Amino acid sequence: MLTSNFTSYPLKKVLSKPLTSGGGERHGEFLFAKYRETYSSDLTSEPLTVSKSTFRLSRMGIKIGHRSLSASGERRQPLPLSTSIERRHQPSYSEFAQEFLYPHKPVVITGALERWNALSRWTPQFFKETFASIFLKGDGQKYTLGGFFPTKDDGQPYTMAEFIDIVVGSNNEHPAPYLRNVHLEKFLPELCADVNPMPEYLSPNWLEGPFAQLLETRLNAGRCELFIGGKGTKFPMLHYDTWHIHTFIAQIYGVKEYIFLSPDQTAYLYAKGNSSQITDPQNVDFAKFPLYAKAKLIHFELRPGDMLFVPCGWWHTTRILTPSITVAASRVNQSNWKEFAHDLRIGAPLPLRPFVAAYLMGVRAAQAVAGL
Ligand SMILES: O=C(O)CCC(=O)C(=O)O
Ligand SMILES: [Fe+2]
C-alpha cells in the first residue's frame, strides 16, 4: 500500500541523494511562470473529487458505483455531439506547452510518431505470428494501475493467437474483450524499441528519477501501456485519469472513437471519484441521470499515427471502430503538479497527510533544482 510506503520511506535519504541533470531551461520554471498564470485560474477553482477509495484503486481498473442502465427508465437517442477537438501537425514544443499542455487543452498531434517502427510493423497479424503461443497473463508483474488481460470464461488465459482471432472477428454485437493498460516493458519488452523515441511533448516526466521512486512504483514511471481490442470494444468507463495525471495516447493501428468532456462538465456526470456512473455516454438513462442532458460532449476519431493529449481532469472514454492497437503513457510535471499533489494529499489517511505533503514537496524541489 502506498500509505505505508509513505510512512516508512526515509525522506531525509531521498532529499540527500544526488540530483539528476538534464531537462534544460525549456521545460523549466520560466514556462511555469509564463503560462501557468495566464491559464490556470479557472482550473484551480475546479472542485477536485477524488476520493479515498479512488486513491487506492486503479485509474481504470476497478469500477466504482456503476449502475445498470438497461434495467429501467427513459432512453433517448444518442446526444448530438459537438464539434471535434483541434488537430495540429508537429507543433513546436513551446507551441504545445503554451497552447495545450499548460492550459490543459486536448489536442490530436499528427506527425509525432513518424520515427516509430511500430507504425509500419504492428498489426494484429504481426502480434499473432510473432507471439502466437504466449499466454496473456501478467505473472510476476506489478499491475498497480489495473492492467487488464482478458481471460476465457473458465478463467484460463488466452494465447495471443486465440485473442487476435477474437479481435479480428469482433463486431458491435459481440465485441472482443479489451487487453488494456498492460505494461509493454514487462509484457513484451522486445517491442519497446518500436515505440522510440518518445516525442518531445512527453517531456519532462516527473514520474521517473531518483526522487520519484514512490510515484514510479505506483505509476510505472509513466512508461508505455499497451491496448488491443476489436470493433465494438469499449473502454469500460467514462473517467478522468487518476490523480490528475496527463495521458498521451498514440494510435498505432486501426481507428478509435473518443468521447471527451471538459472538467467544467463534472456537475452533469454523476461522478464517483474519477469515474462517472454513466458508463456509456451515448446511451444514457435520463430518468436516472437527468443532469446529463446538459453535458456537452466532444467527439472525434483517432487514426494511425495520431497522438492524443488527454489533459488532466478531462473526462473521456473510447469505442473501437476497427481492430486497434494503441500505446499510452502518463505524465506528471509542472503543468499538472498542483492537481496531482492535491489528489495524493487528500487521498491519504488524515494522519499521513503531512508526510505525503513533505514527500511531494521534496519531489517538487528536486525537479526544480534539476531544472525540469
Ligand atoms: O482505451 C483507450 O484508448 C483509453 C485509455 C484510457 O483512457 C486510460 O487508460 O485511462
Ligand atoms: Fe483514461
Image: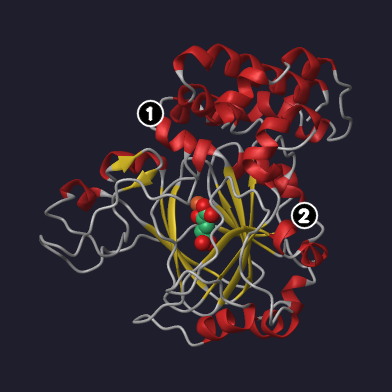
Give the residue type at disc 2: Met
Q: Secondary structure at mark 2?
A: loop
Residue in the picture at 72% in, 78% down: 131
> Is 316 left or right of 282, judged from the image as shown?
right
Image vertical order of residue 23 relative to residue 261, above or below = above
Horizontal placement of 174 versus 126: left or right?
left
User: Residue 258, located in which quarter of the rendered image?
Assistant: bottom left
* SS class, disc 1: loop
> Visible in this render: residue 335?
yes
**Where residue 198 is drawn, which disc sits there?**
2
Residue at x 40% of width, y 61% of height:
83
Instruction: Please tell me which of labels 2 and 1 falls first in the chain.
Output: 1
Picture coordinates of residue 188 (x, y %)? 74, 65
**Vertical side of 258 occupied by 336: above or below:** above
Could you tell me how far apart the alpha carbons at marks 2 and 1 are, in whole angstroms?
32 Å
Instruction: Give amino acid for label 1.
Output: Pro
Which residue does the numbered mark 1 point to in the structure image? 47
- For the point 76% across and 78% down, which residue is it? 121
